[in-house]
Image: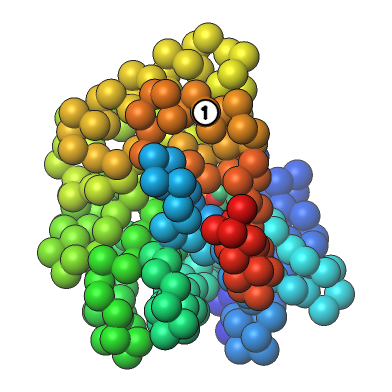
């Protein structure tokens, strides 16, 4: 407990501009927040473009703070990574996502779940056992779970990342490279990773219908990824025009506000039913 308090303070004096007092107080509260049930997962639909079907959801954490209201992950994940508290959040997210997946499965809804894991988690081999244990706990096939990890997180220590991701992949868990295109990994490095999915970063997708450079980047990424046997996901699909283009470019999966926003589970279920009726 003492460590949690000391670290953010040291950070604060060094980098006063980057870490607001709000973020610091949030940080010392994070573990308590998990225990008090203040964290919730929101679910954002992922659409299989050709089939026109919602096949999975990305699970995105929100903090329902008693004072600050709904806090977005960008306001607490980076510091949780620095203090090591991210581990508790990751374990919580995996358990919560798989519990939800099982509930949906029992209701006849076949929805895979994708959980974000951070660079810090890639240094922690015990996550592998936890994933296995939790899949067994909810009696789910490993392929129902995808883990999303950014290319920069992988490149921090690529040997360690390969070792851990290979264990998860051998178990049957699916792996996605998140924010693809924003890091500096080469295709040669990516080839060494047991990856199933590339998620093209939303910065290349959001203006796809207007920006020629983005068009070239997105199209060639899709082609390259397909040649490597990967599924291509575009995030940041904010409207129908972009979705139509992505379909023309043979992109496999689309995710974005134009399809559906991240929603709490009850809202998502209503949305999902409507989506498949219309
Ligand atoms: P991400 O993994 O790249 O997640 C996608 C982010 O883009 C989400 O923001 C989502 O709400 C947003 N988004 C989705 N569609 C659109 C769109 O069409 N347009 C725009 N402008 N944005 C869109 P969110 O939920 O605020 O999450 C931000 C980041 O926080 C995530 O980026 C991820 O890196 C991190 N994060 C969220 N939940 C977790 C978690 O449980 N664990 C870890 N380690 N990181 C998480
Ligand atoms: Ca993600
Ligand atoms: Ca992303
Ligand atoms: Ca991101």
Q: Position of residue 70 (x, y in %)?
A: 77, 66
x 29%, y 86%: residue: 139
Furthest residue to the top? 212
Q: Residue 127 is drawn in which quadrant?
A: bottom left
Residue wearing tag 1: 244
- Residue at x 65% of width, y 86% of height: 37
Residue furthest toward the right? 67
Is 14 in front, or is 61? 61
- Residue 163: x and y in percent read 16, 58
SS at badge 1: helix
| Residue 195 appears in view | yes
- Position of the N terminus by quadrant: bottom right
Q: Position of residue 114 (x, y in %)?
A: 42, 61
Residue 122 appears left or right of 199 = left
Q: Is residue 133 above or below residue 192?
A: below
Q: How is the image coloured?
A: rainbow
State the image quarter where residue 233 is shown: top left
Does ligand 1 reach within 8 Å of label 1's beta carbon? no
Where is residue 40 shown, x and y percent of the image?
A: 63, 74
Relative to the observer, which residue lies in front, 178 or 183? 178
Q: Residue at x 18, y 28 (%)?
A: 227
Vertical order, 61 against 211 (above or below)? below
10 Å neighbourhood of mark 1: few (<14), some, or many (≥20)?
A: few
- Counting the numbered discs, the total is 1
- Describe residue 272's horizontal placement relative to residue 227 as left or right: right
């Amino acid at each position: 407990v003492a460590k949690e308090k000391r670290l953010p303070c040291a950070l604060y004096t060094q980098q006063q501009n980057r870490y607001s007092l709000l973020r610091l107080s949030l940080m010392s509260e994070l573990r308590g927040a998990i225990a008090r049930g203040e964290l919730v997962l929101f679910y954002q639909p992922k659409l299989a473009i050709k089939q026109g079907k919602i096949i999975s959801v990305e699970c995105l954490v929100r903090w329902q703070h008693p004072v600050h209201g709904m806090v977005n992950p960008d306001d607490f994940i980076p510091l949780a990574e620095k203090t090591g508290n991210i581990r508790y959040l990751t374990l919580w997210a995996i358990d919560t996502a798989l519990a939800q997946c099982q509930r949906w499965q029992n209701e006849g809804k076949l929805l895979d779940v994708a959980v974000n894991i951070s660079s810090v988690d890639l240094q922690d081999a015990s996550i592998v056992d936890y994933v296995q244990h939790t899949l067994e706990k909810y009696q789910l096939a490993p392929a129902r779970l995808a883990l999303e990890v950014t290319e920069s997180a992988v490149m921090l220590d690529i040997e360690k990342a390969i070792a851990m991701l290979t264990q998860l992949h051998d178990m049957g868990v699916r792996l996605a490279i998140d924010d693809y295109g924003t890091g500096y990994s080469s295709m040669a490095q990516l080839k060494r990773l047991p990856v199933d999915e590339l998620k093209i970063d939303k910065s290349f997708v959001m203006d796809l219908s207007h920006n020629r450079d983005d068009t070239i980047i997105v199209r060639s990424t899709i082609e390259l990824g397909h040649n490597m046997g990967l599924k291509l996901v575009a995030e940041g699909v904010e409207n129908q025009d972009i979705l139509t283009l992505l379909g023309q470019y043979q992109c496999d999966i689309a995710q974005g506000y134009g399809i559906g926003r991240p929603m709490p589970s009850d809202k998502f279920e209503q949305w999902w039913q409507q989506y498949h009726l219309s």
